[in-house]
Image (cartoon, helix red, strand yellow):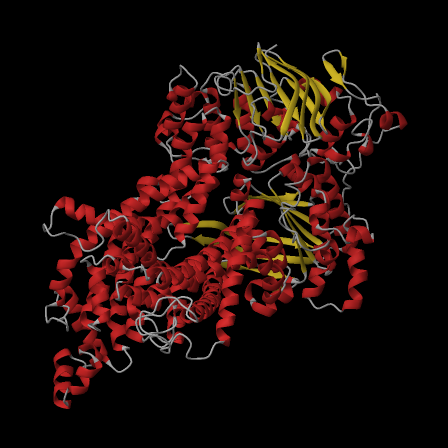
Amino acid sequence: MTLSLRDLTVGYGGLTAVDRINLDVAEGEVVALVGESGCGKTSLARALLGLLPRTATVAGSALLGEEELAGRTDWKNVRGRQVAIVPQGAMTGLSPVHRIGAQLTEMLTLHGGRADPAELLERVGLQPAMLRCYPHELSGGQRQRVAIALALAGEPRLLIADEPTTGLDVITQRQVLALLAGLGTTMLVVSHDLTGLMPYADRVAVMYAGRLAEVRPARTLAAEHAHPYTAGLLTATPVADRQVPWGSIPGSASALDLLPHGCRFAARCPLATGRCTEEEPSLRTNGPAQVACHHHDKVTFPTVPRSVHAPGEPVVRASGVRHRYRTRSRTTEALRGVDLDIHAGEIVGLVGESGSGKSTLARIILGLLRPTHGRVEIAGEELTAQRGGALRRIQRRIGFVHQDPYDALHPGMRVASLVAEPLVTTGVARELRADRLRDAVSAAGLPVTEEFLRRFPGQLSGGQRQRVSIARALVAEPILLVADEATSMLDVSTRAGIATTLRTLAVDRALAVLFVTHDLGEAVQSCDRIAVLRHGTIVEHGPSADLAGAPAHSYTAQLLDAARTT
Amino acid sequence: MPWRYAAGRLTEYAAVLAVALTLNFALPRALPGGPLKLFGSPEALARLTSDERAQIATQYGFGKPLHEQFLDYLGGVFTLDLGTSLSDGRPVTEALGEALPWTLLLVGTSIVGTALVGVTFGVVGALRRRKGKGSGLLGTAIVLDSFPQFWLGMLLIVLFGVQLQLLPTFGVSGVEGVTVSGVLLHLILPVSTMTLTGMGYLFLYTRSSLLTVLTSEPIQHAHARGVPYGRLVRRHALRPALLPVHTILMMEIGFLAAGSIVVETVFAYPGLGRLTFDAITARDYPLMQGAFLVLTLMVVLMNALADATYPLLDPRARTGGHQ
Amino acid sequence: MTLLSTQGKIGTGILAIVIGIALYGTLLPDEAGRARVADPYAPPGAGLPLGADDLGRNLLDQLIVGAGTSLSLAFIVAMATTVLAALVGGAAGIGPRRLSATLMRGTDVMLVLPELILYILAAAFLGQSFGTRVAILALILWPVPARVLRAAVLTAWSRGHLEVARAMGAPRWWLLLRHGSYLIGPLLIPIFVRTAMRAVIYDATLSFLGLGDPTAPSWGTTLFWVQTNGVFLSDAWLWWALPPGAAITLTVLALALIGISVEERLNPALREATR
């Protein structure tokens, strides 16, 4: 064994983030450590490098060969040489003032690497000419590769990659993962993306609330998983195929200070029985796999319903929309003539990578941005021709769900005033507000209790915050809902739940919904029609099922390829 | 595109020059009592006959339309003809020319001193923030930053000149005449005054900038890659931390140049500042105007010089800075 | 965190004392510190705790009245500058693109011009009455805070909750009062305090150069007479020069301490690092 963890525990002043983890990584093996935010995977990774804050305590053992990593204080000649990391957000973590060559040379000298900087670059698939570049001259994917090369410089026995694909486009994500898997280095990849890692890892370890739920060879995971949480994660990851259902795990992970006594997943598990809440299941070996569950049954989760009814009148008509951003040094063509209609009761997916112009189009439809050319009509009124009060009157018929649930809610307002804000700004009479507020809160799938309405955003989970955002978008009875990457920052287990709510709203209220996303799989699952945007042009446009089944454009096919797991 | 960057900055400095010249032209003409006041004390003016007034007005062109006056003024500036001093009848340019080198010496030394002391202590203050030395430095810097220059100068005179009798407090030379060592000795107190009052803000800014950079992603990541702490600070954190400090240093140049008026007055140092003070006291407006112009030009030029060094620190400024 | 609030408390304490003295000064008769009440150069004695200056004027009265001049000037200038900076910064942040670009170029130009030199130049030519000085200072001091506020407004305007409200048709006043004030309001405190600091120092410097209002006693003017009379060659500097000098320094120090403690509270990186 290269790495062997025995009862590894990480605590932060009484709260246990990582709880008695036992896991081995063999020589040359790629193990994926998968879980949602707050499950302790990052704490575990950082404990192996001594990067935890001072307040953290580490117990148990983590042997890397003969070196004990747990609780170590002297990391000289270990960090970077024995165990190296590709840190989370590595593409923004390169030194901005040094050339790539200088940064590689520094690592080589520090950690006694014998390779040549150019060789390192070639190993990660970059041209030696890039040695003379500064990080700001490279793309995100190239910078991620440089970060990997930096980690390889010291020829470490173990490489830890912490969320190595965050911030990258889907196609680049696969390339980076393929690169990592092909390095032949012993590796622990920490990620929230279970299905994304399955093709590249040898084994997958699923973590929930500080404990390991299941460890299993990646090849057989899709067919043979045994833990309900693994099943939940798998069904919660949207597949770009309308035949595969998309489900969500109800509820949200409990906070570290409120961990239940028995199985930590019991509260969200459809199979949970009395035994689960009383007795904590231990991780039992079963052939090549280990599972911590009392049950052996198959589990089902609630899935997103499919729409079968015909769309109504057109609500949005965008035609010939062009937009150009001008900065001091250059002009960027963000949209090059885009036409898009959205009908009542219909969810239209706008799919594209970052920089494709999808956010620009969303902002133009919201009236936040005036296009350089072209027009947008909302229910027959020309939005793009209006200013001031007339523009605001149209805007009041549009609901907006922002991408970032942590930034979209004023931290000093309570749920009730947050949701009621559009009513106040549109001057709805005070006595009418209470009913409409409660109506919107319950339509967004939130509890309508006094206690809940009095909460501040700080007291809500990410999923609840996004539902408050939806309630706020609904309360003024809009005809159009714009959801800009509304699920991208949520845990995967809650995404399908939000999509279900959006579907119900579209059907019940005959809402037109524009669903902006970078994830084609999610769009296929939740939208009626999809428009694929690339470099400011819609390259393909059609019903979700057709587009997923038989893509007409090669770019769509590429995206579908990247979104498919096997 | 470095030329674009340079061109942008050049245009900006041209605009600064234009504003400085315009202000210098316009302010005397906005003088309550009219521009004639430029030509002597109220008592002297009262003695002028109306013929003499008219003569001065024609001679200096106050009768002409404003735009012609402005062109004449610009012509004067570019031919180095700034009029005649009212107090001793010398050409203003000559008086300024004599004083300028002394001020350049004082301000130049002070800028270098302030930058070195402020940045060094700022770095120490950031690195030792949890220890006694760090908080001691922080306290000292805050207190020094609160001292008006003339007041600190006075205190230094009382302490080193009057009480300890260690250092000269007056002028640039003793009885033996102008010597290199004499001048350096005379520079100690004025430069200390400038440096001590100027370093406070630079210290605070460097400290907070370095603290911010030390918690930034590139530094955290370099730490995670096993870069030892000392190297982390020297190689990785220092340069990015100094980028914003560079901007502050440019403001510091203006502060120190203005300080020369005060400090030269306190130490009777024969530079532009002292000349300005004398001109203010004697209400010698042409001299005042000239001295202000030269001081402002000095600041603008020094700023342009400092600005030209910025791309050396930040590679992003060299290539146009997108992304 | 505790260290910061201690700093802030010390600052507030000193400032409160100076404000108290200034308020007491308004109760004094008009000629306090202006009229001849003793022999020139009288040393401290009964009724004259700080002695008299070269014209036999009461130095303690000058100190007390000077506190009022300094503080009221600093307060009004800081007020006016903050408002001006908020207007310019706000307009440059959310106004039409062309206006914004023009304002920022203008601000950049103003930033290069040395503030104190401009102040002395303008006061020398335009006059030295209280109102003129306030106006000049406010017109000179706005660029730095305007830049800070523009950046803050730009950040605030891209914040999610503000953008959502804007997209859903909330009027501008609502955006400003409900969202903008929450995001930008706290920044105005250090700006106000820093401007007040600079106003105190610059105005004292102006008076020290003999360009103060000759009819109103002020700390800087007292020190101008100290300088012209060469007072620090004698023991008289102890009661003549030390009190006004210390008063300026303490007032500025008090403001600085308040400003720094607010700034460190607002900057998460500093807060993290000093913990």
* Residue A496 higher or lower than A316, as above or below: above
Position of A466 relative to A61 (above/below): below
Q: Quadrant of residue A102?
A: top left
The residue lying toward the viewer, choosing from A156 and A482, is A156
The C terminus of chain A: image quadrant: top right
Q: Where C143 sits versus C211, above or below?
A: above
Residue B37: x percent and y percent? Answer: 22, 79
Q: Residue at x 41, y 16 (%)?
A: A112
In this rendering, the answer to whether A275 lies above or below B179 is: above
Residue C168, quarter of the rendered image = bottom right
**Residue A338 in view:** no
Figure quadrant of the N terminus of chain A: top right
- On screen, residue A106 versus residue B195, left or right, reads right
Q: Nearer the viewer, residue A524 or B144?
A: B144
Q: Quadrant of residue A427?
A: bottom right
In the rendered image, residue A89, in percent from the top left (x then y), is placed at: 53, 34
Where is residue B60? Give x, y as percent.
Answer: 15, 78
- Left or right position of C18 against C172: left
In-image side of A243 versus A170 (left or right): right
> Does residue A542 appear in the picture of this structure?
yes
Residue toward you, A520 or A60? A60
Count of numbered circles on the image: 0
The extreme right residue here reads A274
